[in-house]
Image: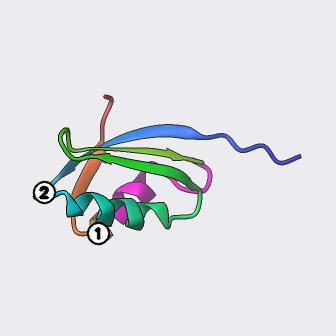
Amino acid sequence: MNTTTSTHTTLRAEGFSCPSCVSKIEKQVGRLAGVESVKVQFATSKIEVDHDPAVASVDDLVAEVAKAGYTARPSAF
């Protein structure tokens, strides 16, 4: 039986300038193994990710956002 433990991580992003940034980040982070869902909130600059921390760490998520051309950091809320 395969059980995965999913974690919900919120990142704060910087450098958002347009709504098209949202889909760019969602596509980039969504490609990462272990990521189940990605939701970017343009108005609040938050990136919410459901992921398996054993496969995709928070550092991995931040690195993927950087590959999309934006800066992100973990956020408590």
Coordinates of residue 28 in the picture (x, y in percent): 39, 67
CA gap, disc 1 and disc 2: 11 Å
Q: Are there few (<14), some (14-19), or many (20+) residues within 10 Å of tag 1?
A: some
Quadrant in which the C terminus appears: top left
Q: Secondary structure at mark 2?
A: loop
Q: Is residue 63 magenta?
A: yes
Can you name the residue that lies furthest to the top here?
Answer: 77
Residue that appears at 13% across and 57% down = 15
Q: Is residue 30 above or below residue 38?
A: below
Residue type marked 2: Gly
Towards the viewer: 48 or 5: 48
Residue type marked 1: Ala
Q: Earlier in the sequence, mark 1 or mark 2?
A: 2
Towards the viewer: 63 or 39: 39
The residue range painted magenta reads: 54-65
Q: Quadrant of residue 27?
A: bottom left
Identify residue for label 2.
Answer: 15
Q: Is residue 61 above or below residue 67?
A: above
Coordinates of residue 72 in the picture (x, y in percent): 26, 52
Q: Is residue 50 magenta?
A: no
Coordinates of residue 59 in the picture (x, y in percent): 41, 54
Identify residue for label 1.
Answer: 68
